[in-house]
Image (cartoon, rainbow, N blue to C red):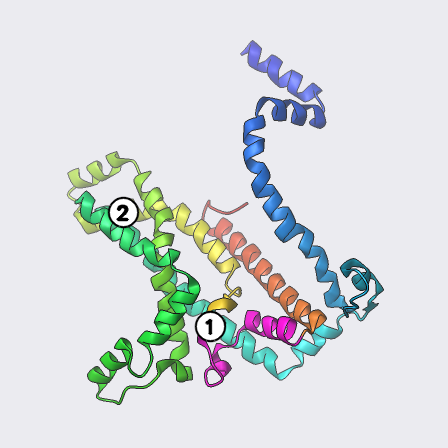
Amino acid sequence: MKQKALFENNKKQLSFGARAKKDMMSNWPLYLIVLPVLAYYLFFFIFPASGLVIAFKDFTIKPKYSYLHNIVASDWVGLKYFKEFFGSVYFGRVLKNTIIISLSTLAAGFPIPILLAIMINEVKSNPYKRLVQTVTYLPHFISLVVVCGMVKTFTSDTGILSVFLSKMTGASPETMLNNKSLFVPIYVLSEVWQQAGWDSIIYLAAITAIDQDQYEAARIDGAGKLRQIWYVTLPGIVPTITIMLILAVGKMLNVGYEKIILLYNPMTKPTAEVISTYTYQRGLIERDWSYATAVGFFNSIINFGLVITANIISRKISDTSLW
C-alpha cells in the first residue's frame, strides 16, 4: 500500500509531458505499432478535411498555380452552394433514395450476421463449421466489380434469377436491373450476401467469450437450446450488438457509390441515385468542386449527428456506448 501511494504521489508530481515521455520510452514497441494507423488517418482523413473550406468558396482550378494557392485565391461565397443544393430538384430525390437504401440495408443486413454467428456457433461438427465459415466469408474478398458483374448476369433476362422468377410467377423473363422498383431489393440482397459472413466474425468472437458455466446452469434449470440462446447468448453479446448498431447508424447515409454506379442505369437512376453518387457526378464528372464538397459536407454532418444521437440514446437505455 505504501509503495502504491508513493507511486501515485510521484505520478502527480510529474508533468504531463514527462509522464508521456516516460510512457513512450517504456512502451515504445506499442507506439511503433500505432504509427502506421495514425499516419493513415492523418494523411487520408485529417489533412484532407482542410479541403472542406472550398464548400464556402467559389473554387476554380488554375493550372499554373498550386492547389493551395487556388483555394486561398478563391472568393468566399458563404452558404451559396448549400442553399443551391437544398433548393435543387435533386435534393429531395437523392435524400429520399439514400434513406430508403440505407434503412433497407440496415434492417436486412444488421440482424443476419448475428443470426449467422449464432447458427455457426451451434454447429458441433468442426469440419462442417469451418466449411460454412469459409463459404460465408468468401464473398467479402471478391472484387466489387466481379460481384456487380455476377449480379448483372444473374438478373439479366436470361439469368438464373430472372428465369427462376419467371417460372414461379408465369411472367416472361426480364432484365431485373431495368426495373426501378427492383433496384433496391437487388442492391440490399447483394450487400447482405457479400458482407454477412464477414460481419459475423465479431459476433462469433463475442459469443466465444461468454462464460460456459452460464450455459451449464441454464441446462441444469431445464432450458433447451432456444432458451439458452435467448437468455444466455443474446444477453452476452448485447454490448457488442449495441456498439455495432451505433457504428452502423453513424454511416447510414454513406451508401457506397461504387456498387450503385456499377449497377444502375438511366432507367433505374430515379430510385438508385444517392447523395454519394450525386457528389461523384457533380464533382468528378462535371467538375463542380465547390458544389460537390458542400453536398459531401452536408452528408458528413448528418452522419455525425446520427452517431451522437445513437450514442446518447444507447447511454440512456443501457450501460453501453462509444463514449
Tell me residue 274's x, y (percent).
Answer: 53, 73
How would you rate the neighbour count of disc 2 (Cα within 10 Å): few for under 14, some for 14-19, many for 20 or more? some
* Label 2 with label 1: CB-CB less than 8 Å: no
Q: Secondary structure at mark 2?
A: helix
Quarter where residue 146 is shown: bottom left
Q: Is 118 drawn above or below residue 181 in the view shown?
A: above
Question: Quick check: 23 left or right of 81?
Answer: left
Q: Which residue is labeled 2 in the image?
A: 231
Q: Which residues are magenta?
A: 261-286
Question: Quick check: 191 left or right of 220?
Answer: right
How would you rate the neighbour count of disc 1 (Cα within 10 Å): few for under 14, some for 14-19, many for 20 or more? some
Q: Amino acid at mark 2?
A: Tyr
| Residue drawn where x is 26% and y is 89% of the image | 172
Q: Amino acid at mark 1?
A: Leu
Viewer-closest of 193 and 139: 139
Tell me residue 164's x, y (percent).
Answer: 23, 79
Quarter where residue 157 is shown: bottom left
Q: Which residue is labeled 1 in the image?
A: 262
Tell me residue 264's x, y (percent).
Answer: 46, 77
Q: Residues under labels 2 and 1: Cα distance?
A: 43 Å
Question: Quick check: 70 left or right of 274?
Answer: right
**First along the sequence among labels 2 and 1:** 2
| Residue drawn where x is 33% and y is 54% of the image | 137
Q: Quadrant of the C terminus?
A: top right
Question: Predominant secondary structure in magenta?
Answer: helix
Tell me residue 309's x, y (percent).
Answer: 55, 57
Is residue 123 shown to the viewer in this render? no
